[in-house]
Image (spheres, grey):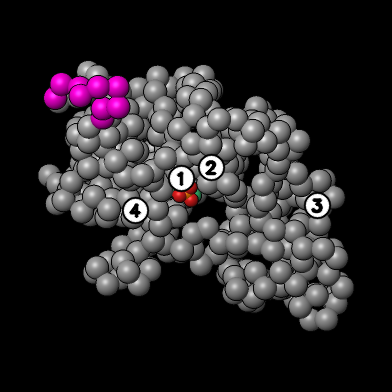
């Protein structure tokens, strides 16, 4: 058996590979330079161009781009009417932003457990958490695979809840042939560099609901409008604008918008290559009894954002931490998505108790996110596979 690098052996590769990295080509660079040489660095023509592109790609009627995925979630919640005293149901197996946005509104995030096979929020768990205070559901498309949206939509319709889809992972994914962005009442995207499409920072809110869209656009710019039909008083002249609500500065720059639009031209390419890598991984790992893979549902035509291996700890001598560290020593730098949100001290202080979502908690102990990004070569993929095999082989229990 090959000696592990963590025990002094040779690593499977000399250079580190990380779990994610952005892909920027010459077109992307030119798209930013073009803006730098233009008249507008922010609030210019690139904003509307990107919004139109997002509508074309997703089929959504309206889109608004803004500073990041978190601000997108925040204004989505306000637009959906979430207020102090309300409850909003979401998953704990997500980035903190998916629940923090509810707190920003003075409302309470209620965590519903995940399906232990798909790792997405379980519709039955959502239904069991509904009270008369529930206003909305925030469904996260974990790793890029859509949540069970038909069942969740049905629940939302029956209980008159707004369905907000956190699509930070799922741009480019389709559900029953409908692109993410055109399925739920409101969908948000993030364009952070670890996500499939990046602008450095950036976010978007997509909807088919005109009223939601108008609220989002106001909230993005302090609640200020120049639209004549939105003014409460007679215009004082050309310069006139009014603040009609309390909003924020959640604007995005034209530099970022231009980069995101250029990145979106590569969405099909990104999907094709990432799907190839996922297929290679699936094949390599499917016969390793110490690993369980995320179940893929046929309804989701997925542009995968993350690839997660779940360890069968019962068949291993060591903890997830030891395996994570052994992979790092082999120069495979992994991550873990996610720590259940209510484990964080801030949430614990608010009174959330461990034990409320046992499936998510159990999963958290067992998962490792391995590298998945567009520019990985087949050799990179093979290195990751070899390292995972080598580490598992060293630490698996043997029946002598
Ligand atoms: C990245 C992410 C966000 C937040 O996006 P930012 O652009 O970083 O603010 C929200 N939800 C999920 C699931 C994410 O992965």
**Residue 61 lies within the magenta run:** no
Q: Which residue is mark 4?
A: 99
Numbered badge on residue 380: 3
**Residue 236 lies within the magenta run:** yes
The answer to which of marks 1 and 2 sits earlier in the sequence is 1
Q: Nearer the viewer, residue 72 or 323?
A: 72
Q: Nearer the viewer, residue 113 or 103?
A: 103
Check if mark 1's residue and mark 2's residue have beta carbons within 8 Å. yes
Mark 3 is surrounded, within 10 Å at the Cα level, by few (under 14), some (14 to 19) or many (20 or more) other residues, namely some
Residue 176 appears in the rendering: no
The answer to which of marks 1 and 4 sits earlier in the sequence is 1
Residue at left offset 81%, top offset 57%:
383
Mark 1 is surrounded, within 10 Å at the Cα level, by few (under 14), some (14 to 19) or many (20 or more) other residues, namely many
In this view, 219 is above or below 310: above
Q: Which residue is mark 1?
A: 68
The region drawn magenta spans 233-241
Q: Which residue is mark 2?
A: 191
């Amino acid at each position: 058996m090959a000696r592990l690098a963590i025990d002094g052996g040779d690593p499977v590769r000399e250079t580190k590979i990380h779990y994610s990295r952005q892909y920027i080509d010459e077109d992307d660079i030119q798209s930013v330079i073009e803006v730098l040489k233009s008249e507008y660095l922010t609030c210019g023509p690139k904003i509307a161009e990107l919004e139109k592109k997002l509508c074309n790609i997703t089929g959504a009627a309206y889109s608004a781009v803004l500073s990041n995925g978190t601000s997108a979630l925040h204004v989505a919640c306000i637009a959906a009417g979430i207020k102090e005293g309300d409850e909003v149901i979401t998953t704990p197996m997500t980035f903190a932003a998916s629940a923090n946005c509810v707190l920003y509104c003075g409302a309470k995030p209620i965590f519903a457990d995940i399906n232990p096979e798909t790792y997405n929020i379980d519709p039955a768990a959502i239904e069991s958490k509904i009270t008369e205070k529930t206003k909305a559901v925030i469904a996260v498309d974990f790793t890029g695979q859509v949540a069970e949206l038909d069942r969740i939509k049905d629940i939302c319709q029956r209980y008159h809840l707004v369905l907000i889809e956190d699509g930070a992972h799922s741009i480019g994914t389709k559900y029953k042939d409908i692109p993410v962005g055109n399925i739920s009442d409101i969908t948000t995207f993030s364009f952070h560099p670890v996500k499939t499409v990046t602008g450095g920072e950036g976010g978007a809110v997509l909807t088919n609901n005109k009223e939601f869209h108008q609220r989002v656009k106001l909230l993005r710019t302090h609640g200020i409008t120049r639209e004549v039909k939105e003014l409460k008083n007679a215009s004082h002249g050309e310069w006139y604008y009014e603040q009609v609500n309390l909003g924020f500065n959640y604007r995005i720059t034209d530099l970022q918008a231009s980069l995101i639009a250029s990145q979106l031209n590569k969405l099909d390419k990104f999907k094709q290559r990432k799907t190839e890598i996922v297929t290679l991984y699936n094949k390599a790992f499917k016969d390793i009894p110490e690993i369980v893979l995320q179940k893929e549902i046929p309804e989701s035509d997925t542009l995968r954002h993350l690839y997660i291996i779940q360890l069968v700890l019962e068949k291993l001598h060591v903890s997830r931490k030891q395996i994570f560290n052994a992979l790092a020593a082999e120069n495979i730098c992994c991550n873990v998505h996610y720590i259940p949100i209510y484990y964080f001290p801030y949430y614990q202080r608010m009174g959330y108790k461990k034990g409320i979502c046992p499936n998510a908690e159990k999963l958290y102990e067992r998962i490792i996110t391995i590298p998945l990004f567009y520019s990985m070569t087949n050799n990179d993929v093979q290195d990751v596979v070899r390292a995972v095999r080598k580490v598992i082989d060293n630490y698996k229990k043997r029946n002598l």
